[in-house]
Every structure is written in C-alpha cells, then in structure tokens.
Amino acid sequence: MSYIKEQIALIKKQDPSISSTLEVFLHPSFKALLYYKIAHRLYRKKHLFLARLISERGKKKTGIEIHPGAQIGKRLFVDHGLGVVIGETAILGDDVTLFHGVTLGGTGKEKGKRHPTIGNRVFIGSGAKILGNITIGNDVKIGANAVVLKNIPNGVTVVGIPGTIVKHNSKKVNEREM
C-alpha cells in the first residue's frame, strides 16, 4: 500500500496536468508500474510464462513495455510513456524520469547482462536510446533523441548521435564523443 501512495504522490508532483488523485489511476505510468510489480514478483519466483503474460497485458494497455526481469528502483516516473521499452537486464536506480519513446535496450551483440544500468536522479528525454551493457551515472540528463552506447559519468548532460557530453557540473565543457 505504501508503494501505491508513493506513486500517487509522485505522479501528482511530476505531472501538472493531474488535478485529482483519481486521475492518477488513469496515468499510464501508474498502470504500467503496477503491471510490472506483479510480473516482476512472479518472475523472481520463476513463474516466467505468467510473468510475461502479465507484462504483455501491461504493454497492450499502456504502450509501455517493461520486461518482468528488469530491476527498477523507487519513484520511476514515465511521462507520456507510449513506446517506452525497458529490457530484461536493465537496472534503474531511484528517481528516474523517462519520456515517450525511450529505449533501454540491447545491441543484439551481447549475452547475459545486455541492457543498461541507470543511476539515481536520471532524466531521459523523448526518443532517447540507451543501448547495451553500459552504465549511466547519477544526476545525468540525456536529451531527446540521443543515442548513448558508452558509459556516462555522474553529473553530466548528454545530447546527440552519438551521445556527447555538453555540460558537466553546470559548466559547458569541450564536447567529447561518448
């Protein structure tokens, strides 16, 4: 029950279009994460088919695809979530925000851990693709449509294709290809 209360508070805080608590129950982030929680619990208990069945139902209802094997920290917020994909071995820290069209996926070349690890307090803009077994540090902002294929340190802003650091600790730095 505390999880639901936390999600309600988060969505009301993050989405200015929400004017009542009842509207939160219609928010795709709320519904997708509820499906994920159930599917993830089943996945951990090795009820893989049932976990995937519930996960697929959640995807169909919300347009947000979260594999039941993904590990998600506290207070994930998915705004306008249509087209969001979170792969099986992805790990997300606390206070992560994802916008529509974000992919936390694999490259198709890896075995085992093949999806990204996302730190705490990370913002990922619309259409961004973070691919492969890479690590995104804490307090990172990834711009819309960026494609990130390499590790990103803490406290930077990344934009472009390929993802390039454009800010560090609130100061512009020379662009370095990621």
Image (cartoon, rainbow, N blue to C red):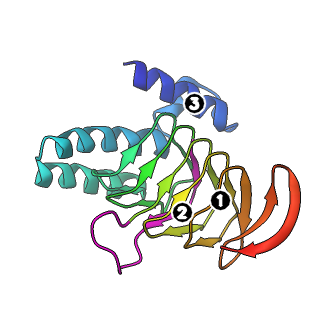
Per the rendering, the mark at residue 150 is none
Q: Position of residue 173 (x, y in %)?
A: 86, 64
Whether tag 3 and tag 1 are in contact, CB under 8 A, the answer is no
Q: Residue 31 lies in what quarter of the image?
A: top left
Residue at the location (57% across, 42% down)?
Answer: 120
Between disc 2 and disc 3, whose residue precedes?
Answer: 3
Numbered disc 3: secondary structure: helix
Cα separation, mark 3 vs mark 1, equals 18 Å
Cα separation, mark 1 vs mark 2, equals 7 Å
Numbered disc 1: secondary structure: loop
Q: Which residue is more in the foreground, 103 or 56?
A: 103
Numbered disc 2: secondary structure: loop
- Main secondary structure along the magenta-highlighted residues: loop
Cα separation, mark 2 vs mark 3, equals 20 Å
Whether tag 1 and tag 2 are in contact, CB under 8 A, the answer is yes
Q: Quadrant of the N terminus?
A: top left
Q: Which residue is mark 3?
A: 10
In this view, 121 is above or below 63: above
Image: magenta residue range: 96-114
Q: Position of residue 60 (x, y in %)?
A: 33, 58
Q: Is residue 56 left or right of residue 93?
A: left
Q: Residue 64 lies in what quarter of the image?
A: bottom left
Q: Amino acid at mark 2?
A: Val
Residue at the location (66% across, 51% down)?
Answer: 154
Q: Which residue is more in the foreground, 176 or 49?
A: 176
Per the rendering, the mark at residue 102 is 2
Q: Which residue is mark 1?
A: 125
Between disc 1 and disc 2, whose residue precedes?
Answer: 2
